[in-house]
Image (cartoon, rainbow, N blue to C red):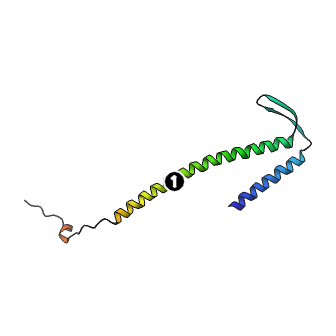
Amino acid sequence: MWIIRSAIILVIFLILLGFSFENNYQLTTVNIFGKQYDAVPLMIVIFVSFAAGVIFWFVVSVFQYFRISGQMQDYKRKNKQLLEEIKALRNLPFDEVTPQDMLPSAKKD
């Protein structure tokens, strides 16, 4: 699985790199929170956007990791409790059953 993920990341990186070299002469205007920047190279805009996306992905992944880690601890605790309950049930003594206990009880008048 890690090979596929690494290959996808490599392909995306190469596509972005090729795209940036194709457009290194192009300049663009960027508006950020009402402030306008003129004559910004498109390659810089692409790189900053990519870096911001990677940082956002990393932050979301960290929160998801901690959430899943907490759930896993809860499941381990519950699993341990259930295993202890099963062990306690296995150690219960058996009640002896006589053949008379298996017969339907006779009705007394």
Residue 33: % across, % down: 76, 30
Q: In this view, does 47 lie above or below 3?
A: above
Q: Which residue lies furthest to the bottom in this view?
A: 99
Q: Is residue 46 above or below residue 32?
A: below
Task: Locate the N terminus by quadrant.
Answer: bottom right
Q: Which residue lies furthest to the top in this view?
A: 34
In this view of the protein, which residue sits in the foreground, 103 or 71?
71
Residue 86: % across, % down: 38, 62
| Displayed quadrant of residue 98 | bottom left
* Residue type (three-letter) at the residue carrying disc 1: Gln
Determine which residue is flagged by label 1: 73
Q: Residue furthest left?
A: 109
Residue at 49% from the left image edge and 52% from the top image edge: 74
Task: Locate the C terminus by quadrant.
Answer: bottom left
Say which element carries label 1: helix
Task: Please indicate whether residue 102 sits to the left or right of residue 39 in the image.
Answer: left
Q: In this view, does 1 lie above or below 71?
A: below
Residue 49: % across, % down: 78, 42
Residue at 20% from the left image edge and 71% from the top image edge: 99
Graded by Cα atoms within 10 Å as few (under 14), some (14 to 19) or many (20 or more), the crowding at tag 1 reads few
| Displayed quadrant of residue 97 | bottom left
Residue 85: % across, % down: 38, 59
In this view of the protein, which residue sits in the foreground, 71 or 12?
71
How many numbered callouts? 1
Residue at 75% from the left image edge and 59% from the top image edge: 7
